[in-house]
Amino acid sequence: MNPPSTLFGLWRHSFEEDAAGVRVYRPAARDFPRARGRAGLELKPDGTFVELGIGRGDKSVASTGTWSVQNDGSLSLVYADTQRGARRLEILEHEAEVLKLKDSP
């Protein structure tokens, strides 16, 4: 399945909006409230991704891999670090200003 081009780019975790296991992401250019760190997910058109976690001293820690949208519309992340394996995320909502994801079994 070809992903919509609006998925491409850097999304920052807007944890203030999370509810019931749903993680809310907003475009990185958005003016976010101050936080000691903010996770993110960059989906690139070439099928690679960079996942930004929060590490020591609130610095970003990057994990990389490949991504694809599956036939059921879910997002599949396969990490370059084979110890991490793969992750499937249900896309609950996707518009230009919001991306809502939930872990999928």
Image (tube, rainbow, N blue to C red):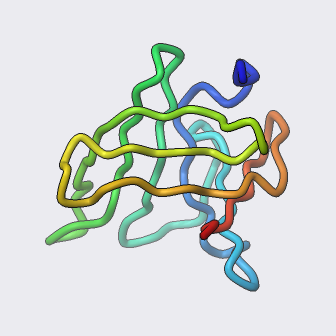
Q: Estimate the x, y position of residue 54 in percent, counting from the top left.
A: 30, 65
Q: Estimate the x, y position of residue 21 in percent, counting from the top left.
A: 68, 80
Q: Residue at x 60, y 36 (%)?
A: 29
**Of residues 38 and 31, which is closer to you in this image?**
38
15 vs 2, left or right, is: left
Q: Given the current orientation, which residue lies at the most extreme top position? A: 46
Q: Residue at x 56, y 28 (%)?
A: 9
Q: Given the current orientation, which residue lies at the most extreme bottom position? A: 20
**Of residues 94 and 66, which is closer to you in this image?**
66
The answer to which image quadrant residue 100 occupies is bottom right
Image mark count: 0
Q: Is residue 82 above or below residue 43?
A: below
Q: Estimate the x, y position of residue 105 in percent, counting from the top left.
A: 60, 70
Q: Residue at x 53, y 16 (%)?
A: 45
Q: Residue at x 41, y 34 (%)?
A: 49
The answer to which image quadrant residue 75 occupies is top right
Q: Quadrant of the N terminus?
A: top right
**Of residues 20 and 83, which is closer to you in this image?**
83
45 vs 37, left or right, is: right
**Of residues 84 and 12, which is closer to you in this image?**
84
59 vs 94, left or right, is: left
Q: Estimate the x, y position of residue 76 in percent, counting from the top left.
A: 54, 45
Q: Is residue 12 above or below residue 3?
A: below
